[in-house]
Image (cartoon, rainbow, N blue to C red):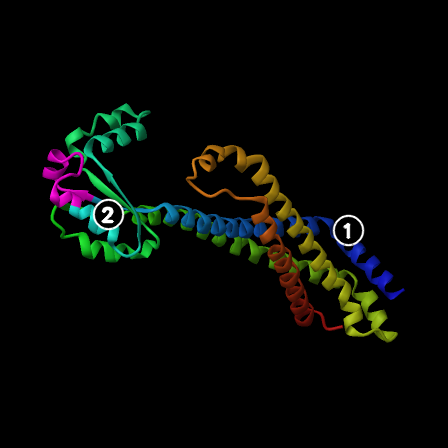
Amino acid sequence: MRLTLIIREVFAGLTRNITMTLAMIITTAISLGLFGGGLLVVDMTNKTEQLYLDNVEVEIFLTDDISTADPGCETDICSTLREDLGEFPGVTDVRYVSREEALEIYRETFENNPEILDLVRPEALPASFRVRLDDPDQFVAIYEHFNLYPGVESVRNQEELVQRLFSVLDGLRNGAFAIAIFQAFAALMLIANMVQIAAFTRRTEVSIMRLVGATRWYTQLPFLLEAVVAALAGALVAVGGLFVTKNVFLDDVLSEVYQSNIVAPITNAAIASVSPWLVGAAAVLSAITGYLTLRWYVRE
């Protein structure tokens, strides 16, 4: 009987201040949606980073004289360098790229950009060794050992380019989190206001119940549950919004990017994995905010 009464009071409270309830649900949904989006960007960044690092290579560019006179890497300097690279600890693969092959790769990469193709002359592309490592962190050892080798012009690690890409993704993630924090603050303020107004409009009922022996928890529990229910509704809207955005919008816009393995795709499984965190955050924060509001403002 008491449970039925509490449920009825919660429903009445939510519908009595319907505009504030809707405002709280929408604000909570936006806040949690942005927070969930930030978590998904973190997950995508981590997967993309691993995707790139698994394929990252160290490029050892050769001097112009070797690039010009030794297209097959047959001289002692070039062949010795190839052997030493292959025997270096942690190296899993060594591939020689001649000047002609480098030019062909360049043309294939920029075949749709004739303006860029015209900027580079064949002799500007050096021959190189592309070295695959079992651990990308070994680049420092490769650099220190081979940077001053005979025939070596420079050593470049593709990981530096990867980190630049991740700095952009990290900026997007941090921006989403910053907006989510402001939205969360607004949602918490709405929760506090909703609890105060609900308690004020039913102050006479609460006073009567306290006079006949009802405990503080029993009289204040409906207000607390109203806040939690509204926040959970916002969390469900946020989760639904993430699924809809991913399947209706992102998959279509980023389909070519996903197919090219430029970034790792956002999956439904990833959204499902962050959803419990969103629902849990909504329940816990709304319950704490509601409880503190009742303790601070409601004295009956």
- Please state the horizontal and vertical placement of residue 62, each as a whole percent of the image: 16, 42
Please check the rendered image and state whether residue 62 is part of the magenta-colored stretch, yes or no: yes
Tell me the SS state at disc 1. helix
Using the rendered image of the protein, determine whether residue 200 is visible from the camera's viewpoint: no
Q: Is residue 147 above or below residue 126?
A: below
Residue 64 point in image, percent of width and height? 12, 38
x 90%, y 64%: residue = 1
In front of the other: 158 or 14: 158
Q: Which residues are magenta?
A: 61-79
The residue drawn where x is 19% and y is 38% is 127
Residue at the (19%, 33%) spot, across then down: 99
User: Is 207 in front, or is 256?
Assistant: 256
Decide: few, some or many residues near mark 1? Use Cα within 10 Å; few <14, some 14-19, many ≥20: few
For mark 1, what is the residue? 15
For the C terminus, the image quarter is bottom right
Tag 2, which secondary structure? Answer: strand
The reply to whether the C-beta atoms of the residues labelled 1 and 2 are less than 8 Å apart is: no
Q: At x 14% / y 51%, what residue is drawn?
A: 149
Q: Quadrant of residue 193?
A: bottom right
- Residue 272 in sight: yes
On screen, residue 104 versus residue 25, left or right, reads left
Does residue 77 belong to the magenta stretch? yes
The amino acid sitting under disc 1 is Thr
Q: In the rendered image, which residue does mark 2 sit on?
A: 156
In front: label 1 or label 2: 2
Is residue 214 shown left or right of residue 286? right
Real-space Cα distance between discs 1 and 2? 64 Å
